[in-house]
Image (cartoon, rainbow, N blue to C red):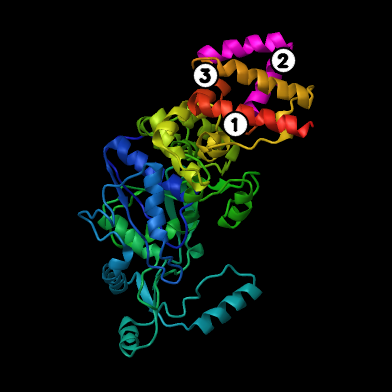
Amino acid sequence: MSDDLQPVRVRFAPSPTGRLHLGGGRTALYNYLLAKKTGGTFILRIEDTDKKRYVDSAEKEIIDGLHWLGIDWDEGPDKGGPDGPYRQSERKQIYLDVAEKLIEQGDAYYCFCSPERLKEMKELQQQRKEFPHYDGCCRNIPLEEAKRRVAAGESYVIRFKSPQEGTTTVKDLLRGEMTIDNRQIDDYIIVKSDGWALYHLAAMVDDHLMRITHVIRGSEWLSTLPLHHLIIKALGWNEPVWIHLSVFLKPSGKGKMSKRESADLLKDGYSIFLTDLKDLGYIPEAVTNWISLMGWSFDDHTEIFQMEDLIRDFSLEHLNPSPAAINFTKLDFFNGNHIRRLAPEDLAQRMKPFFEQQGYETDDATLLKIAPIVQEHIGGLDEAPNMAGFFFKDSVQPSVEDLIQKGLTTEQCAEIASRSYTLLSGLPEINTRIGEPEMRDLVVEMGLKPAQVFGVLRVAVTGQKVSTPLFESMEIIGKEKVLERIKSAEILLRSSNS
């Protein structure tokens, strides 16, 4: 199963009928990695022939989501290329011409069965507990008669004429050869009554004309792989290498993950949709690292991958067809890890929208200062405003309850604020190098614990019990504002005790 490193031509071919989810993101990623690894070509093709389910915003979300992940393509609807157009809605006649060829050579036929007849047929099959299938009513209509009926305006679909005897053997790279009894392969519709080709025909035609060498797609297409094999064989074309990826399971490991669970996941701060993950504070480096390992592994211990690592190390040989449970705890781990690998300048700009969404007026200079001290303490970009929003406030409003530390009275906490104010106001500047040793001496002098003294100071200065490192924070806030906040805390404590 080893890669030969010949340049491949691969494609990601989403249908713009909904949002881009983790499964689509992983499929796109694996295709992209294989193309980059082999010096090949990665194509984006939009399969937009399902007009009933088409969603106007879906194509943009797909493109934005892929770009966010760091995935780009060599040919596509926005870039063009030698094998365009790259939207199936612009290729209708191409499919009809191929369907006509299949009819002329006896591998497809016009079917005039009404929806009412098909419904009745299906109900009878269910009553007889038969596997649902088309009964072949129109299969043997002479071609000339069928053409006369078409010319007369009779409604029809085009069906592929699957063999009714023998077996068909297909090969999936991950699962090996699979042999199917031809009686189990239905005469599938390949062109609908409105003239639009279905996936079974359109994707095979496009893959051939776009010279696709490897088809990496979801496992939901395994059941119709024999049909796709037969269509390609009937047309005398070369077959691509088929690779059907593993199924995503729910986090519990019980049952296939579906879009219907997305609302429940959001309540816990998670989602299976890429744009949601972006809004929830996840960074693309973490998401690509995470999804790359749900169906592929480099070895039994390496976990952290940047995109350049994935391109270098990715191989078809290490893909795994076994179902993969979606583990959001692992995503959180990757997110924190990759956040800590960002350059401060990069992190500052990525945090900025999250501060602004919460109403903070930020400035780039302050963001750059706080990035290194926030970096070690957040697991997601969305946590930054709660951790460090106090930097962008003119004042903070701590509660008396938060200011009072364990084992101390209100008066003792007010005294800590007062003594701290006096000590810090006498220093040339407040920072870790100068301020911390002096404050630690004060802790000893007052006979208290560091957590008690620094706890009062932290809440007074930041307005919260958990924050970025205290002295680094005070240095960024500035001496004048720090002293104002400490004095306000002292006044609040004394007034509450009177």
Magenta-highlighted residues: 433-461
Residue contact between numbered discs 3 and 2, judged by CB atoms under 8 Å: no
Q: Position of residue 406 (x, y in %)?
A: 77, 24
Q: Name the kind of residue labelled 3 in the image.
A: Ile
Q: CA distance from mark 3 to mark 2?
A: 21 Å
Above-or-below relation of 267 to 124: above
Q: Is residue 409 left or right of residue 282?
A: right
Q: Position of residue 100 (x, y in %)?
A: 29, 73
Q: Magenta stretch: dominant SS?
A: helix
Q: Which quadrant is the N terminus positioned in? A: top left
Give the residue at mark 2.
Answer: 449
Q: Name the kind of residue labelled 2 in the image.
A: Lys
Q: Position of residue 390 (x, y in %)?
A: 55, 35
Q: Nearer the viewer, residue 19 or 249?
A: 19
User: Mark 3 or 2, which is nearer the eye?
Assistant: 3
Q: Name the kind of residue labelled 1 in the image.
A: Thr
- Identified at 56% across, 27% down, the residue is 482
Give the residue at mark 1.
Answer: 462
Q: Nearer the viewer, residue 227 or 263?
A: 263
Q: Does the stretch in magenta take in 136?
A: no
Of label 1 and label 2, which has the lower sequence position? 2
Of label 3 and label 2, which has the lower sequence position? 3
Q: Position of residue 189 (x, y in %)?
A: 42, 71
